[in-house]
Image: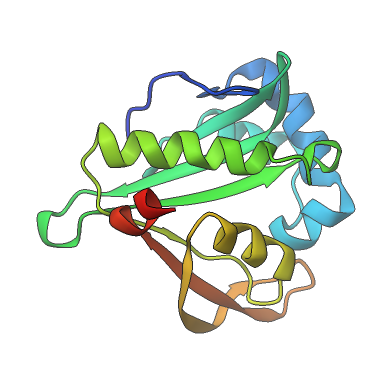
């Protein structure tokens, strides 16, 4: 199974597009930043190439482009089984682009596209439960906590950490 087909999406300051080979260096630099690596773990060029640039899994890997520069990545997944249909999202943004509304704009572009073009009624996101900054940002977009997923993901130090499942319904998003 491959990820959802998304066109290039244009916002006011952000362009979302499929990742390309020339995104390897900026993505690796971003994933190597301490604040990003704390949540996303260790990455090297081979892993970026394999898991992001050539990824054929159930998520679309998109570059977040700002002023023609790769500023981060957005992953969009899609559950297509009719009785469980929904979309999921994840994001990583280089430190220089954080706190400027870039991530919020990128997520809005993807969310609106998946609601409108793909007919989804619900989005999920699952930050580490200790990632308070991300949780605040997602809540500002309308995501609500659903529950704590205990020992959900392995942290870079090898320990298990909890994740917070959050979701966003189309009618709640449109009411914001």
Report the quarter where the N terminus lies. Answer: top left
- Color scheme of the displayed model: rainbow
Q: Quadrant of residue 37?
A: bottom right
Q: Quadrant of residue 154?
A: bottom right
Quick one: which residue is furthest to the front in this view?
175
144 left or right of 131 in image:
left
Question: Which residue is depicted at the point 52% across and 65% down?
Answer: 126
Give residue 73's position: percent from left, percent from top.
62, 37
Nearest to the observer: residue 151 or residue 62:
62
Q: Residue at x 51, y 83 (%)?
A: 148
Q: Position of residue 104 (x, y in %)?
A: 60, 43
In the foreground, 2 or 8 = 8
Residue drawn at (51%, 42%) of the image: 75
Check the image and name the residue furthest to the left: 82
Side of 94 where 143 appears, left or right: left
- Residue at position x 73%, y 64% from top? 133
Q: In the figure, 14 relative to 89: above or below?
A: above
Q: Quadrant of residue 168?
A: bottom left
Residue 99 in the image: x percent, y percent?
79, 46
**Residue 12, position as x, y percentages in the image:** 60, 22
Number of numbered discs overlaid on the protein picture: 0
Residue 16 visible, this angle: yes
Does the image show residue 1? no
Depth check, front residue: 172 or 144:
172
């Amino acid at each position: 199974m491959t990820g959802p087909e998304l066109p290039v999406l244009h916002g006011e300051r952000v362009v979302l597009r499929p990742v390309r080979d020339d995104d390897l260096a900026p993505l690796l630099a971003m994933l190597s930043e301490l604040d990003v690596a704390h949540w996303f773990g260790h990455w090297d060029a081979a892993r970026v190439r394999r898991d992001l640039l050539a990824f054929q899994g159930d998520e679309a890997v998109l570059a977040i482009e700002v002023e023609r520069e790769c500023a981060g990545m957005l992953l969009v997944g899609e559950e297509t089984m009719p009785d469980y249909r929904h979309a999921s999202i994840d994001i990583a943004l280089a430190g220089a682009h954080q706190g400027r509304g870039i991530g919020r704009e990128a997520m809005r572009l993807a969310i609106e596209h998946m609601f409108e073009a793909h007919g989804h009624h619900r989005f999920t996101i699952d930050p580490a439960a200790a990632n308070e900054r991300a949780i605040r940002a997602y809540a500002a977009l309308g995501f609500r906590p659903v529950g704590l997923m205990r020992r959900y993901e392995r942290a870079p130090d090898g320990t298990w950490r909890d994740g917070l499942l959050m979701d966003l319904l189309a009618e709640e998003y449109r009411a914001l």
